[in-house]
């Protein structure tokens, strides 16, 4: 399908043509092992170093603080498990939030099974972390606070600097998953007191299977993948040279005129939000309206089954998501939507549209037309909607 309307950029993005072009020679003529002494190897080494510099610059870090991984999930695993191993003497208590990505939540669950104690701090109705609850959760044996920079489902941007200042004032390490934030909003690891930060290339028009963990200089965490001496002896395995080159190129592209692009996408986002609100009754926008990723839209539609909505949108060539791709197909509603207080039946009827620069106003109009038609149809088949129309049910719209 060539004329698909793709609004699932929080799940993954299309590699930019420049990214692909920069990557290609590192599959063919520049195939050297970056750890080899001869010229061909050094060429790969240099290409990785350039990418490292670009990515470090993007988050105001040093290039020696960037460690390449096989994606955001590995970076999250490494950060959390690495701290647990290195700081076991100090304590076994970790603080995170109820709306983290599964890469963080499931890692914490795994550690809970190993004797670690995890506090899950709640969020308000817009998904903003409850700072008072976070402060209260801190204990003498807390070794780590891990909070996502910007949520992948509802787009809410957390008060990262405030959390970083709190963690640092208490001598607790602070990790943030910035997979959705990198390239969309500005990030300054020093200013925000971030000790570790996870990023991934494929969420910003780079290739899949490559990401990085920023580890603040001086912070001691152990290896997670053992083997050769790559990545300053902390992450073994021959470098993914084409992937890293693509990651660097993608970050460079994202950073160029980032605020102009964000403004443009925000314009389209707000247009779509308004249009959905006006044209489709009994809907609710999830996530903070202001502290929100420029490309995120998340709505709940009452009396609608989310999976059915997605399938019917797909039949019209529209690619969207019900929340996180990882939970699609599972019977549970999104943990993020439940955490912001939505009842199960409302959380089930949710839709995430995540935009890219390539989306147009014409596409936005087509999506609203399709949504209107599909939702009308689904509601006409819903016994709950029938009851509601007869005045025997309540609605969510304020
Ligand atoms: C996509 C995503 C991840 C996982 O990154 P991968 O590179 O796909 O492993 C982690 N955290 C967040 C917030 C994400 O959106």
Image (cartoon, rainbow, N blue to C red):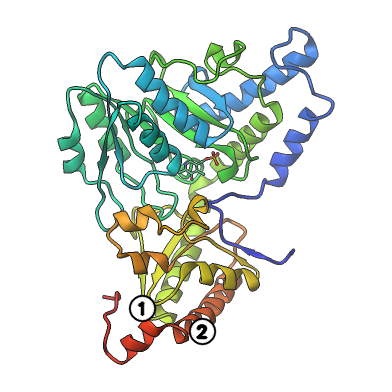
Q: Which residue shows up at 26% across the image and 75% down it? A: 398
Percent x, y of residue 301: 40, 73
Q: Mark 2 or mark 1, which is nearer the start of the sequence? A: 1
- Figure check: 352 above or below 138: below
Residue identifier under label 2: 377
Percent x, y of residue 151: 40, 48
Q: Can see residue 87?
A: yes
- Figure check: 396 above or below 188: below
Number of numbered tags placed on the structure image: 2
Bin the neighbour count of mark 2 within 10 Å (Cα to Cα): few under 14, some 14-19, many 20 and up: few
Judging from the image, what secondary structure is the residue with disc 1 in? loop
Q: Which residue shows up at 75% across the image and 15% down it? A: 41
Disc 2 residue: CB within 8 Å of ligand 1 = no
Instruction: Determine which quarter of the picture holds residue 167.
Output: top left
Q: Which residue shows up at 50% across the image and 20% down it? A: 224
Q: Which residue shows up at 79% across the image and 12% down it? A: 39
Bin the neighbour count of mark 1 within 10 Å (Cα to Cα): few under 14, some 14-19, many 20 and up: some
Farthest residue in the right direction? 29
> How far separated are the C-alphas under marks 1 and 2?
14 Å
Percent x, y of residue 37: 74, 7
Closer to viewer: mark 1 or mark 2: 2
Judging from the image, what secondary structure is the residue with disc 2 in? helix
């Amino acid at each position: 399908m060539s004329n698909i309307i793709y609004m699932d950029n929080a799940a993954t993005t299309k590699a930019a043509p420049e990214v692909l072009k920069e990557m290609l020679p590192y599959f063919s003529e520049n195939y050297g092992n970056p750890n080899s002494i001869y010229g061909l190897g050094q060429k790969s080494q240099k290409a990785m170093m350039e990418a490292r510099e670009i990515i470090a610059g993007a988050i105001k870090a040093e290039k020696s603080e960037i460690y390449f991984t096989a994606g955001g999930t590995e970076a999250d695993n490494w950060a959390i498990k690495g701290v647990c191993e290195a700081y076991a003497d100090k304590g076994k208590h970790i603080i995170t939030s109820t709306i983290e990505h599964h890469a963080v939540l499931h890692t914490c669950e795994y550690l809970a099974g190993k004797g670690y104690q995890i506090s899950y701090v709640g969020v308000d109705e817009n998904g903003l972390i409850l700072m008072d609850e976070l402060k209260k959760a801190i204990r003498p044996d807390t070794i780590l606070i891990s909070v996502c920079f910007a949520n992948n489902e509802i787009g809410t941007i957390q008060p990262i600097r405030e959390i970083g200042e709190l963690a640092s004032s208490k001598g607790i390490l602070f990790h943030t998953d910035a997979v959705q934030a990198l390239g969309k909003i500005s990030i300054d690891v020093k200013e925000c007191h971030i000790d570790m930060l996870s990023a991934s290339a494929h969420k910003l028009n780079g290739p899949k299977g490559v990401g990085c963990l920023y580890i603040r200089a001086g912070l001691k965490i152990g290896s997670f993948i053992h083997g050769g001496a790559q990545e300053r002896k902390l992450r073994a395995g021959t470098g993914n040279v084409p992937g890293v080159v693509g990651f660097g190129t993608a970050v460079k592209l994202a950073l160029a005129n980032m605020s102009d692009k964000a403004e443009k996408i925000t314009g389209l986002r707000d247009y779509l939000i308004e249009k959905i609100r006006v044209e489709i009754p009994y809907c609710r926008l999830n996530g903070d309206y202001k502290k929100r990723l420029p490309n995120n839209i998340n709505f709940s539609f009452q009396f609608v089954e989310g999976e059915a909505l997605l399938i019917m949108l797909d039949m019209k060539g529209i690619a969207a998501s019900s929340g996180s791709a990882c939970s699609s197909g599972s019977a549970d509603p999104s943990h993020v939507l439940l955490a912001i207080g939505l009842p199960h039946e409302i959380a089930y009827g949710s839709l995430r549209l995540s935009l890219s620069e390539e989306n147009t106003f014409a596409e936005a109009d087509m999506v609203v037309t399709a949504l209107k038609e599909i939702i009308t149809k689904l509601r006409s088949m819903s016994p709950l909607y029938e009851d509601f129309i007869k005045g025997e049910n309540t609605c969510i719209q304020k």
